[in-house]
Structures are given as structure tokens and as C-alpha cells.
Amino acid sequence: MTESNPLQETIAVKADHLYKAFGRRPHEIVKKLKAGKSRADISSLGVAAVIDASFEVKKGEIFVVMGLSGSGKSTLIRMLNGLWDTTSGTVTVGGTDITGVSAKELRDIRRKSISMVFQHFALLPHRTVIDNVAYGLEIQGMGRAERLAKAQTIIDLVGLAGWADNLPSELSGGMQQRVGLGRALAADTDVLLMDEAFSALDPLIRREMQEQLIELQAALGKTIIFITHDLNEAMFLGDRIAVMRDGRIVQIGTPEEILTDPANDYVAQFVQDVDRARVLTAVSVMEPVRSVITKTAGPRAALHTMRDLQTSVTFVLNRDRSFAGIVRDRDVLKLVKAGETDLRGIIRDDATSVSPETALVDLVEPSVESELPIAVVDEKNRLLGVIPRVTLLAAIGNVSTNTGALPIVMPPATISVSQITEILGETADDTQIDAAGVHA
Amino acid sequence: MNDFRIPIGSWVESFVEFITDTFGFIFDLVRAGFDGAYEAVEFLLGAPPFWAIMLVLGVLALGIRGWKFAVGTVVGMVVILGVDQWDNAMDTLALVLVASVLAIVISVPLGILAAKSTLASNIIRPVLDFMQTMPAFVYLIPALILFRIGVVPGIVATIIFAMAPGVRLTELGIRSVDKEVVEAGQAFGASPWRILRQIQLPLATPTIMAGINQVIMLSLSMVVISGLVGAGGLGAQVIASLNRIDIALGFEAGLAVVILAIFLDRITASLGSSDSGGFFGSIRRVLRSRRVTDAVAFAPDTNPAPAPQRARV
Ligand SMILES: Nc1ncnc2c1ncn2[C@@H]1O[C@H](COP(=O)(O)OP(=O)(O)OP(=O)(O)O)[C@@H](O)[C@H]1O
Ligand SMILES: [Mg+2]
């Protein structure tokens, strides 16, 4: 329980080479697996439910374990709170190795640090909803009035107001699931294990619960280990996702890493039909900005850039490299012809700028409304990249594009190159402009 | 072949002799204890006038199963009274109560132990098989030697004979409680004792009650057989009728046994069923109504002991 290494404080749960085998001689199975035998090789001896699972879950993280039925998710989660012994490997919760502690210490840890929502609810059928929700508090030793009051607020939170005095058997599956969730929430532990906690809910409530969970997580900073076989759910909830197959973790990564860079065909197939528009964010699809100048560079530099890149628009940055807006070729041309040197008068702000975390689904509308690429800016308003419409469509449709082709990235030039060159030649010499700075 | 003989019988005999010689004082103590318990219960049932007992049994029947069963009970008791077996029936009832309470007190904890430990289960199971299949009369012989003639050998033989289903069904009931619900208890940090008390026992109650029902029924049949060793009651009447080939007495005593059996069976059976006014259901209802009316009452953490009130069917 004592912390010696301050670095470890950020790790809430750690699994280190976990194995779980069912059969007459589980240790023999694990020995064979470690010697390189496959799951099929040992099938005569028993089932290897979890094979060599290692991961670290950071404090305040939502860590999703995803995999098809029978891939070992429930077995894995049961080892994380010591419900089932590991056949080999260690689990650390809040700095304590729970695979080696006494039964009493383990109970203490479960009371204080780690609670669980069960796949099949596992409510106490002879207790009312409120007594079920208050169960963890009861075990923690809280007085009856206090725990009932707290349980009541949780019941309201999970949307079961008015059902407090009913028995679980009088509730629908989805409502029972929410009782299970409420019971875990009421216990108020740092770590929450959730085994397919939302699978019995209908889609609307499910979404609502997912959103609530994220809110809750943000508000209370809980560490959540969430099991699901629904990829969209995994992508929506997960800060990181571990994909399991036949007992092994085949990939751990952020939703985007898993989507954009699947470790193998299995993961790739798994993620094939995910709702990409909700998962991918602006930062993951944006392209580098090519057509960009600083505000002080002047109209001739702008025109020069647009000629070289064959676009009718260029992005303009302030001195501190924050995003100022765009200029269009016609306006610049007028300025140059008039011999003006200040761009400020013609900078427009009609390009949409979004934060890097914006989901693609939220980019569709601005992208349809304007032919201009969407600007992605950070919290200091610095231009990170752009998302042209084609790039957005390609990302949502999961088509790979050769986005190096400039004409489809930026609005194409509306004034011919020769015309621009002519005007530039008429007004001044080019060397000076190049020195003014064209940024990529 | 003819010379081959394993003298198991004489081994057991010497063993029993050895025990009688060495631990005689213990058996005397047990004898005194059981005798005292029987005398007390017998006094409770025998001392009041018959109508008082009838009234109590009738009210009990009314509370547990309803008015039809209450009427049936009273009619049955009147029949027993009518065939002049009332005192004998009360003696037998006292024997059954003492023997089955003791059998339950021994068998339920053994069942819990067997459910919790596979080792214990593996040891207990063959012993139970043995106890259940050995002809019932055989128990009477050592019991007779150890405890001398009277009610005590009858009670002891009855306990041994009737215990098995109590142990078995308790183990079955606890083992068949939904594993995930038990895991839920563990996952929130409940101690094994608390899980037993708050999850396993309440959920296993219907099965355990079925076991208790079996124990009581077996006790009744064994108590009759104990008439052979002087346990008195209806059993003695049956034995007497057998000796005298007295069909009339045999039938009347037998009829009284049947009436007692039906009464005990119905009462205990309805204690087990949780639906429609069962014992468990009524406790629950009482508890819930109490919370609704008295929301801030501080109740102890445990499930309160079975409440005396019972709802009607
Ligand atoms: N108690 C057990 N005894 C034997 N095998 C088991 C046991 N529990 C699980 N298994 C096996 O371990 C494997 C993984 O099971 P697990 O329940 O962890 O899968 P899961 O990923 O949770 O599946 P689901 O999505 O259906 O819940 C399965 O092949 C299962 O048959
Ligand atoms: Mg599962």
C-alpha cells in the first residue's frame, strides 16, 4: 500500500503477464504456453482463457477491453480484483500487488479501491433496489440512514427514481443493469471495473449512460476499466483500447491508433464497420498547410505563393503564428495592382477553424457550407493543419487518397499563372518577395 | 470358501463395547440431556387440555396456510382424539420435535461446511450414503446399548436416520446460489461469513426448507420404529398391535401417524416456498412495509430474525 516510487502513483491498475487457464493442471498449461505452444495445442488439457496479458491503466483513464465473445474479457477483469486467482502473473492495484496479499487485505482493497459492475447484473434478488445500491456502503460499514440517503442520490443519478423499493425481479433487464451500475458507483471506489455494463440497455439509454459515464469520469476522476464487444462503444468511451482475441491482447492503443493503424487483419476487420465519423478527430486527418503566409509578408508574397501552388486562397498568420484568416487571389491582385503593401484590409475570416479534438462528424456541416478547407487550430489559435473537403470525405469513407495533389486540396486558382506572373513582373522584382518569407 | 469370514460384525460389537466402557459418562450426560428436552416438550404438549393444543395448532395452520388447512388440522386432531390416541400422538409429536430439531441443528451446519469445502463434502457424502441406506432398525441396537431402553435411543437413532437430507439439501441449496451473486459479495469486499449470512443462506432457504421438511418426515417414520426400544407414543401402539395382531388398534394408531404426518408436511412445506405467502415471502413483505413506514429506523446490518408475523395466503 505504501508508495515508494512516485512515478507509480499515476498507474492505477497494472497487469503483468497475466495467464489464466482452466483445466486439471492449469500451471502445466501455462508452462506450455510460455514455451511457445498455441491455444489450440493445449486444448486437450483445458482452456487458456487469458494468455500473457500485460497493460497499465493510468489514474483517471477509461481503459476499454474489447473482443468477441469468449475472448477472455470477463476472465481478465475477474483477475483484476482478485475474484479469480491468476494462474501466473501479477496484478497491481494502487501500488499493491493483490496477487500476493491475504484474504483480509484483499477484502480491504475491494472495499476501498475497486468495485465492479457484472455482465449479468448479479444483484441480490432478495433485496430491494435501494438496498442493492447501498450494498457496498453497508460492507464499508456506513450507517443505515446515511447509506440509504447516498444510495437514493445514486438511484436518481442512474435514472431509477421511484423504483427504490422494488425488487430486482420487478425491473427490466436494462433497469437491473443500472442498479448494478449504481451499486458500483455508490461504493465510490477509485477504480471501477465494468463488464459489458451497458450491453443490456437500449440504444438511446445506452448512449445517455455512455455520456454520463464520461461526464462522471471527468467530474470524479475515476479510473474505469470497461469491457465491451461493441466497437463503437469502445471507440466512444475509451482513452485507450485493448483488443483481445482468443485470450491474447493483440493491440493496445488509442481509438484512433486502432482505427488508422490496426496491428493485424483481425483488428482491421474488427474496426471495419465502426462509425468513423464519431471516432476520428480533426487532428488525425488534417493535412499540413502549404498555402500560408505571414500577415507582414505583403500582397506580393501572397500572390507569389498562390501562383506557385496554383490556388485561389492562402492562409494568413499573425506575427505570433496565430491564425488570422485567409486572403483571396482577386483581392490580392487588386492590392498589388494598386501598389498597396498592407494585407490587413483584405483578410477575411470566412474559413472555419476548429480544435484538434473535434470529431469528424462535426466537420461535415462547415465543410459543405464552404469550399474553403477547415483550419485546425490549437488552444493558442496556432494553425496546425487544414482539412479540405475531399480529405474529410475520404477519412469518413475510409478511402486512402493521394492528398498530395494540390488542386483538390485547395480551391483551384481562378487567375491564370501567366496573368499573375505578368502582374508581379510589372510591379516589382521577385527576389525581394522570396525573402519576405513563404511558409509551408 | 466356507472358512472365509470377515468378522466385521464382531469388530463393531467390540468397538461399541469399548466405547460404552470408556465413554460411558458421556453417554449418560447425553442421555440426561435428551431425556430432559423430551420431558420438557412432552410436558408442554401433554399438560394442557386437548382443546388448548388444538387451538394452538389450528391458529398455526391458519397463519401459515390459511383457513382450509386450519379446518383440516382441527378435523384431523378431532379424529385422533376420537380414536383415543391423543396422548400417544402428543408423545410422538414431542419425540419428533426434539429429534428433528436436533437433526436440523446438526445437519444444516454440516451442509454449510460441505458446501464451503470440497474436502468436507467428499468426506460427508459417503457417510451420509451409509447412514441413509443402513436399515433403520440397525441403529437401534447400539443406541439401545449406549443409552439403555427408553426415549433416548429412539431420539438418537432418529437423528442419525433423518439427518441426511438436511445435510444434502443445505449443501445443494448453497452450492446452487448464482455464482455471480456470490462474486458480487466478494467484489465489494464482504467477508465469507457475511456472504453466507446475507447472500447464500437467504437464497438457499427454499432448498434448505425442503431439506428440513424431509428431516421432519423421516423423523416421524423413525420415531414410530423407535417404539421397539421403548420410546412410547404411537410407535408403541403400533408395536403392540403387531404383537397382538390387533387390526383395529394398528389401524387407529397408523391413522394418527398419517394425520400427524400430513400436518407436519404441509406446515414445513409452506415454510419453504417463497411465492404466495410463503415463510420467506412474508418476512420480506413485513420488512418492506416496515421500511416504507419507518424509513429512518436504524435496523441492524443483519437480516432480522424471522419475524413472528406471517401473512395469510
Ligand atoms: N469457470 C470456467 N471454467 C472453464 N472455462 C471457462 C470458465 N470461465 C470461462 N471459461 C472459458 O474461458 C474463455 C473466456 O471466457 P470469458 O467469459 O472470459 O469470455 P468473454 O470474453 O467474457 O466472453 P463474453 O463476451 O461472451 O462474455 C471461454 O472459452 C470460456 O469457455
Ligand atoms: Mg464476458
Image (cartoon, coloured by chain):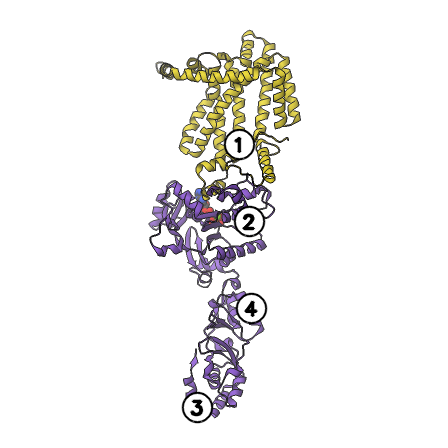
Chain colours: A purple, B yellow
In this view of the protein, which residue sits in the foreground, B149 or B258?
B149
In this view of the protein, which residue sits in the foreground, A430 or A100?
A100
Query: Can residue A84 be seen?
Result: no
Q: Residue at x 53, y 57 (%)?
A: A211
Residue density around tag 4, few if under 14, some if 14–19, many if 20 or more, within 10 Å? some
Q: CA distance from mark 1 to mark 2?
A: 29 Å
Q: Nearer the viewer, mark 1 or mark 3?
A: 1
Whether the residues at callouts 3 and 2 have beta carbons within 8 Å, the answer is no
First in sequence, mark 4 or 3: give its number: 4
Residue that label 2 marks: A153
Q: CA distance from mark 4 to mark 2?
A: 39 Å
Residue that label 1 marks: B305
SS for tag 4?
A: helix
Whether the residues at callouts 4 and 3 have beta carbons within 8 Å, the answer is no
Residue that label 3 marks: A429
SS for tag 2?
A: helix
Vertical relation: B143 (above or below) A161: above
Q: Residue at x 46, y 37 (%)?
A: B194
In this view of the protein, which residue sits in the foreground, B273 or B294?
B294
Q: Nearer the viewer, mark 4 or mark 2?
A: 2
Query: Can residue B239 be seen?
Result: yes
Type of residue at label 3?
Asp
Vertical relation: B263 (above or below) A94: above
Whether the residues at callouts 1 and 3 have beta carbons within 8 Å, the answer is no
Q: CA distance from mark 4 to mark 1?
A: 65 Å
